[in-house]
Image: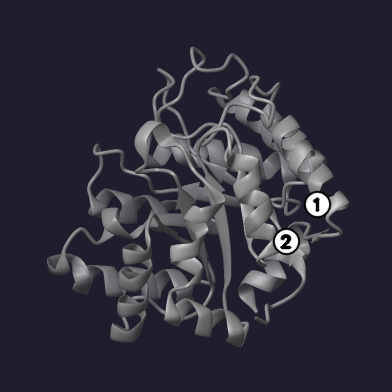
Amino acid sequence: MQYIDNKAAIIVAPNGARKTKQDHPALPITTAEIVADVIACRDAGAAMVHLHARDKNGLHSLAIDDNLLTQEAVKTAVGDSVIVQLTTEAIGQYTPQQQMQLIKETTPEAASFGLNELIPDDSYLPEAEKFFNWVADSGMIAQYILYSAEDLTRYFSLIKQGILPNKNHHLLFVLGRYHKDLLSSPRDLLPFLKQPDFKQLMESGDKRWAACAFGPSEQKCLTSAMLMGGDIRVGFENNLHNSHGAKAHSNAQQVTDIKALTSLLNIDLHDAHSFRKALLS
């Protein structure tokens, strides 16, 4: 296979939608904690941050005010040295219209979209086509989150229908989300990578992809993804433990550990500036 370049990018997901301080005392909840965490992860080697804003009670929020506050605080602190990506994750609390309105009102540099949440059935296709083409035309980096080979097949079908524009986007394969006890394995990558349309896409060097993984085999999964030409996402959203099974000290430590592996494997890393260029090329 041929790829866009021989570099990988580290994305960090510091908190997610569901975890709290009870899960890990270093999980960033407040705006100040999130800002400090992003700075530490940037300094450790992360090129992009996947942001989940929290409300005044520490709960996951797609409220526009909460997200504007978090996004602006992070952007003020890091400038363009990190690609700031907002999530649209609904966790059963927000409608597709609310998810889309969030992005229209906040206009982030990058945003992540769960296709099954934004387009739960075909009745949503006309609205989704307008929205996703607006996202692409605005120059925003769209990341489509896919949980299975079936999701990937649907993604390609939406591309062929013109519902999803074929530019300025990134794929994220989530490993272990639907496995018992949220356990992942490097073998979970195979159904994605063997998909015929995906193989053709990668051979053309036209799109980038990444993987994240749940459970104690996270580091093995991410190492496999990098060796196959993918980017990776680490952080407490998916996994609170290090490769030895102990709770990780921080998100920055998770980034530091995976960066050390890239050095051993002679894998060069993108910073935010080169990653941005690769995603928008």
Amino acid identity at mark 2:
Ala
Q: Residue at x 77, y 60 (%)?
A: 270
Amino acid identity at mark 1:
Thr
Q: Is residue 258 above or below residue 104?
A: above
- Measuring from the top left, give residue 60's x and y in whole percent: 39, 31
Q: Residue at x 24, y 39 (%)?
A: 92
- In terms of image quadrants, where is residue 218? top right
Q: Residue at x 40, y 43 (%)?
A: 177
Q: Is residue 265 left or right of residue 248?
A: right
- Measuring from the top left, give residue 159's x and y in whole percent: 36, 80
- In terms of image quadrants, where is residue 155? bottom left
Instruction: Name the image quarter holding the N terminus.
Output: bottom right
Estimate how packed mark 2 is, as few (under 14), some (14 to 19) or many (20 or more) residues with alpha carbons within 10 Å: many
Q: Is residue 76 above or below residue 133?
A: above
Q: Is residue 86 left or right of residue 117?
A: right
Q: Which label number is shown at residue 239? A: none
Compare residues 74 and 180 and report the one nearer the observer: 180
- Measuring from the top left, give residue 185's x and y in whole percent: 52, 46
Residue under label 1, please give it: 262
Circles 1 and 2: CB atoms closer than 8 Å: yes
Residue under label 2, please give it: 8
Q: Is residue 201 left or right of residue 125?
A: right
Q: Is residue 266 above or below residue 18?
A: below
